[in-house]
Structures are given as structure tokens and as C-alpha cells.
Image: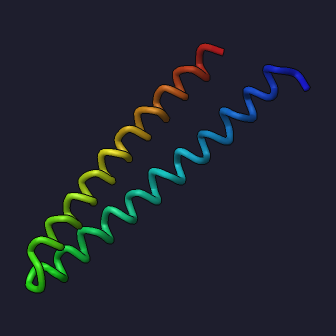
């Protein structure tokens, strides 16, 4: 198999995965925040931990977005 074709396949698959992971993380982030709101009267500590998890999920998504942008730039160069 041609090395350039194999790299194109990897880039294409990674593009699809990055889109999926970003969307999936966004759904989890929202769910964590929703649950934090639901449990705040039960336990502020649990609510705070869920909010922290949501914040970290958003940060992970931000890094995935950067990877997606870098992938696009790398595709333009090749």
C-alpha cells in the first residue's frame, strides 16, 4: 500500500474520531453540570466535584479542538 494513501486514511479516520470525541465530551460535560445542579442540595461537595469534572471535560475538548485544527493545517501542507 502506498504510504501516502495510508497516511490519508489515518488522517481521515482521526478527523472523524476527533469530531466524535469533541461531541461526546460536550454531552458528558452538560450531563455533569445537570447532575451537579440536581444534587447541590444533597451535597455541595458532590456538586462541586461534578462541576470540576465538567470543567476538565471542557478543557479536554479544547485540547481535542486544537488537535483538530493542527490536523487540518497538516493536511493542507501535504
Picture residue at 19% right of the left edge, 65% below the top: 49
Nearer to me, 44 or 26:
44
| Image location (x, y in percent) of residue 36 | 20, 73
Q: Residue furthest bottom?
A: 42
Task: Using the rendered view, name the quadrant where residue 29 is placed.
Answer: bottom left
Image position of 72 with respect to 27: above or below: above
| Image location (x, y in percent) of residue 9 | 75, 34
Q: Residue furthest right?
A: 1
Whether residue 27 sits left or right of residue 4 in the image: it is: left
Q: Residue furthest top?
A: 77
Q: What sort of colour scheme is used for the picture?
A: rainbow
Placement of the N terminus among the 4 image quadrants: top right
| Image location (x, y in percent) of residue 16 | 61, 46
Whether residue 41 sits left or right of residue 29 in the image: it is: left
What count of labels does the image hold?
Answer: 0
Image position of 68 with respect to 38: above or below: above
Placement of the C terminus among the 4 image quadrants: top right
| Image location (x, y in percent) of residue 45 | 12, 71
Image position of 22 with respect to 47: above or below: above
Task: Using the rendered view, name the quadrant where residue 8 is placed.
Answer: top right
Picture residue at 81% right of the left edge, 26% below the top: 5
Task: Using the rendered view, name the quadrant where residue 47 is placed.
Answer: bottom left
Image position of 12 with respect to 75: above or below: below
Picture residue at 45% right of the left edge, 56% below the top: 23
Nearer to me, 48 or 32:
48
Whether residue 78 sits left or right of residue 53 in the image: it is: right
Amino acid at each position: 500500500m502506498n504510504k501516502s494513501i495510508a497516511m490519508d486514511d489515518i488522517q481521515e479516520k482521526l478527523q472523524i474520531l476527533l469530531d466524535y470525541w469533541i461531541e461526546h465530551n460536550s454531552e458528558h460535560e452538560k450531563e455533569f453540570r445537570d447532575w451537579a445542579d440536581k444534587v447541590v442540595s444533597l451535597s455541595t461537595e458532590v456538586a462541586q466535584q461534578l462541576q470540576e469534572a465538567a470543567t476538565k471535560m471542557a478543557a479536554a475538548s479544547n485540547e481535542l479542538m486544537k488537535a483538530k485544527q493542527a490536523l487540518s493545517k497538516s493536511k493542507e501542507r501535504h
